[in-house]
Image (cartoon, helix red, strand yellow):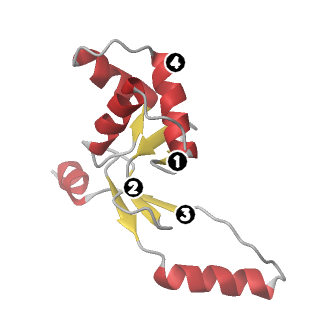
């Protein structure tokens, strides 16, 4: 585990305040708007360090951009992500893990690792789209 510097703590705190996956650019904009003296490269570096330490989750947007989020759980889980606003919900593994293990075993695979993200529209974005 890497040392929690002042800048890393500011980045972590910013992610802790939001339920959506956030880009490094958005975190940078939030922090500088609040008066933090931090560079964009420092934000990127600290987000990567937090992800490597498993303190935040990272996923790729449809455009390939890395997005970060502090999740409510440290155990293995998946995400349901709104493709419009970025809001995300943590999903437990449950039946999905059994299915993955069965599929892997049927093909002779072991030591499976995976990351599953489901993308859709949250109820609020659906309401806005329908009106």
Residue beneath the point at 29% across and 16% down: 36
> Helix, strand or loop at disc 3?
loop
49 versus 92 height, above or below? above
Q: Separation of disc 1 and disc 4 at Cα?
A: 19 Å
**What secondary structure is found at the residue carrying circle 2?**
strand
User: What residue is disc 1 on?
Assistant: 59
User: Which of marks 2 and 4 precedes in the sequence?
Assistant: 4
The disc placed on residue 81 is 2
Q: Measuring from the top left, give residue 31's x and y in whole percent.
A: 30, 22
Q: Which mark is residue 116?
A: 3
Q: Are marks 1 and 2 in contact (CB under 8 Å)?
A: yes
Q: Residue at x 37, y 25 (%)?
A: 6
Compared across the picture, whether 104 is left or right of 25 comes to right
Mark 1 element type: strand
Cα distance in 3D space between marks 3 and 4:
28 Å
Going from N to C along the chain, the mark reached first, 1 or 2, is 1
Mark linked to residue 94? none
CA distance for labels 1 and 3: 9 Å
For mark 4, what is the residue? 41
The image quadrant of residue 14 is top left
* Apparent side of residue 17 relative to residue 90 in the rendered image (left or right): left
Asked if marks 4 and 2 touch (Cβ < 8 Å), the reply is no
Please provide percent x and percent y for residue 20.
Answer: 32, 46
Disc 3 to disc 2, C-alpha distance:
11 Å
Label 3: how many Cα within 10 Å (few below 14, some 14–19, many 20+): few
Quadrant position of residue 102: bottom right
- x 55%, y 63%: residue: 116
Closest to the camera, between mark 4 and mark 2, is 4
Q: Identify the mark nearer the N-term, 3 or 4.
A: 4
Q: State the residue in front, 13 or 101.
A: 13
- The answer to which of marks 3 and 2 sits earlier in the sequence is 2
Tell me if mark 4 has few (under 14), some (14-19) or many (20+) residues whose alpha carbon lies within 10 angstroms of its own. Answer: few
């Amino acid at each position: 585990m890497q040392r929690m510097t002042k800048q890393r703590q500011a980045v972590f705190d910013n992610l802790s305040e939001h339920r959506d996956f956030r880009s490094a650019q958005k975190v940078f904009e939030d922090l500088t708007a609040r008066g933090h003296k931090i560079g964009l490269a420092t934000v990127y570096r600290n987000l990567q360090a937090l992800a490597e330490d498993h303190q935040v989750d990272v996923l790729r947007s449809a455009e390939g951009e890395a997005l970060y989020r502090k999740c409510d759980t440290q155990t293995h889980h998946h995400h349901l992500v709104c493709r419009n606003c970025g809001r995300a919900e943590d999903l437990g593994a449950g039946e999905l893990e059994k299915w993955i293990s069965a599929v892997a075993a049927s093909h002779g695979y072991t030591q499976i690792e995976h990351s599953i993200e489901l993308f859709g529209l949250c109820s609020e974005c659906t309401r806005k789209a329908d009106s």
